[in-house]
Amino acid sequence: MGKGAKLIGEAERLNCDQVKQLEWSAPKPKSLAIPAEHIEAESPFGKFTISWRPWRSVPVCLEKTPWGGWHGVYDSIEKAKEAAQEAYCFRVLYCLKDGERR
């Protein structure tokens, strides 16, 4: 489970319906920068990248977030997107409420 798991409990207590959903790109081919097929989402904080390698036992990685590198591995692209959204939501609402939890 990725680092995002710690934020999931916090995000569930926050009202994430108020935060815009991340918009993901169409799948992109592997490149020198990301040696696997991947999708990206831009946010005011920076870029999220999810990559997948079908031959691995846990094939999907939330590879990059605006606040650091590798974030975790997931069973599906949808689960990785959920982890990215929860981490994004947590940070947006944290900034708006100056650290107070709703």
Image (cartoon, rainbow, N blue to C red):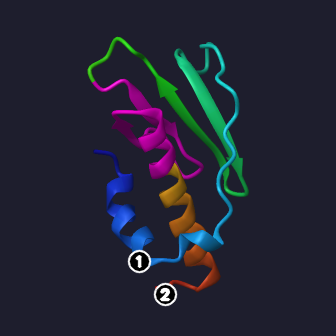
Is 59 placed left or right of 39 in the picture? Answer: left
Q: Which residue is mark 2?
A: 102
The front one of 55 and 46 is: 55
Residue under the image location 45 percent in, 50 percent down: 83
Give the answer, above or below, for where 92 lies relative to 47. below
Please state the extent of the stretch shown in magenta in the rendering.
Answer: 58-83
Sequence-first tag of 1 and 2: 1
Residue 66 in the magenta stretch? The answer is yes
Q: Residue at x 55, y 70 (%)?
A: 16
Q: Above or below — where is 83 with respect to 99?
A: above
Residue 57 placed where, x, y %?
26, 20
Q: Is residue 96 magenta?
A: no
Q: Which residue is mark 1?
A: 13
Quarter of the picture containing the N terminus is: top left
Q: Residue at x 33, y 46 (%)?
A: 2
Q: Mark 1 belongs to which amino acid?
A: Arg
- Per the image, label 2 sits on a secondary structure element best described as loop
| Residue type (three-letter) at the residue carrying disc 2 | Arg
Count up the numbered dots.
Answer: 2
Q: Disc 1 to disc 2, how far (Cα)?
A: 7 Å
Q: Would residue 90 be found to the left or right of residue 29 on screen?
A: left
Left or right of 81? Residue 23 is right
Q: Which mark is residue 32?
A: none
* 94 relative to 5 in the view: left or right: right
